[in-house]
Image: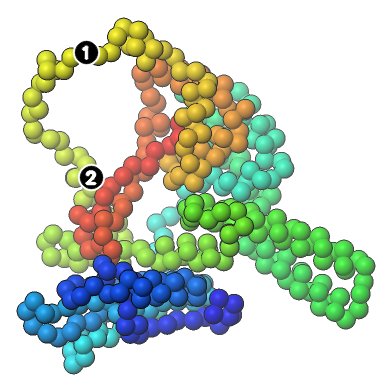
Amino acid sequence: MGTARIPWVLCGDFNIIKDDSERRGGRPRPFVAMEEFNQCIQTCGLLEMCSKGPNMTWCNGQGGQARSWARLDRCVIDTNFLNSFSNVSYQVLARSTSDHSPLVIQMGENLFRYGPSPFRFQYMWTDHLDFYSFVDGVWKREGLGHGLINISSKLPRVKVALKEWNKSVFGRTNIIIKGLEARIDYLESRLQVSFNAEDDSDLLASKLKLSTWLGREDTRLAHMAKKIWLKDGDQNSKFFHAYLKAKLHKRVQEMSMSDGRVLQSPLDIHTAAVDHFQEFLGQSSSRVLPNLSDLISPIITNEDNLNIGRDPSIEEVKDALFSIPIDSSLGPDGFGSGFFRVCWDLVKDDLLSAIVEFFHSHMLPKNFTASYIVLIPKVDKPSGFDKFRPISLCSVV
């Protein structure tokens, strides 16, 4: 299946669950059987299709404590299917005469988008021979002010320059890869008819270029997919691309409100989410906490206090920066730790100056306090906003 060019969708009663959370009541399923099912899905390169409706698709029909439910029915697809039909889902209908719920596959409209994607630093850029010298030329231009203001003026400048550089140097990597693959097919077909030294040399050069571009695409997609458990040599652009589509494919399609309304429009869900969490995060606690300071003995000496309050060294700044994973989620400025690691020799003096200034002034410009609020589902298929946990994504600096 993994090498087939025809899209595959497998839908129906698999008579097994993926893990014990996919049942309610009844006896636990054999662990070996569940592992074999999961291994089969992974070996075949299959992905779970997005579903709507009840999570359990089967009921034994018995009464009282003997009744049990399980998710025995599902739809799984391969990467070819997901690439061809990116917005497909299935609806779990109510059971009637059967003990299994009917499944109806639905081909949806194009995914709703809220506007242009924000800037994200692409770690694949760092593999280009001209990357460092290009950033060097932009970063060394005179900034505005000093310290934090200087950093806040240089990062947007680098962002604008990198976006233009990406367009001219990289373009759309998937189009370049398809062009090189077509070129290789063409050259091989010519060489199969008759050998030509020029075509043979062109074929080798095209294969080297394709290998380079595939590596860049692997780096870009792996960073976006956050598949940090994959080691060098395990990357597969097709898998990463499908994985990202599958994540987008699992977007929230409906949301139940406390007043009984069910929102299905992406814009309505978006607006309601903003209203809900603005109210939730804006609440202030009315609790009065007791003053327990008299019960706590001071254990920090004057020497310790001076040591804690001293200016940080360049080594401490570097250690803190390099401890941030390269694939960590990006904040509003779009620059992850990978940029600062690769460009450390360029940015270290400006970074240290900005951090020392903060230690002295205790003031942060407004743009440094900005963050993204991201909603993390607490459960599979969350149905209400109370089933999400808000977290903040801050910038590196």
Residue 125 shows up from this direction: yes
- To which residue does mark 1 refer? 298
- To which residue does mark 2 refer? 278
> Percent from the top left, x then y, of residue 299?
25, 14
Q: Name the quadrant containing residue 143.
A: top right
In the image, 155 versus 183, the foreground residue is 183
The quadrant of the rendering that contains the C terminus is top left
Give the residue drawn at x 31%, y 7%: 302
Give the residue drawn at x 49%, y 18%: 313
Give above or below for 134 relative to 318. below
Q: Answer with mark 2 or mark 1, whichever residue precedes in sequence.
A: 2
Give above or below for 323 relative to 100. above
Circle 2 SS class: helix
In the image, 243 versus 111, the foreground residue is 243
Q: Name the quadrant containing residue 109.
A: bottom left
Q: Within 10 angstroms of label 2, few (less than 14), some, or many (20 or more) residues?
A: few
Q: Is residue 69 left or right of residue 18?
A: left
Question: In the image, what residue type sits under mark 1?
Answer: Pro
> Percent from the top left, x then y, of residue 96?
18, 89
Residue furthest to the top: 302
Q: Is residue 111 left or right of residue 97?
A: right
Q: In this view, does 319 lie to the left or right of 215?
A: left
Circle 1 SS class: loop
- Camera-near label (2 vs 1) is 1
Question: In the image, what residue type sits under mark 2?
Answer: Gln
Q: Name the quadrant containing residue 154.
A: top right
Is mark 2 in CB contact (under 8 Å) with mark 1?
no
Give the residue drawn at x 39%, y 26%: 365
> Percent from the top left, x then y, of residue 394?
39, 38
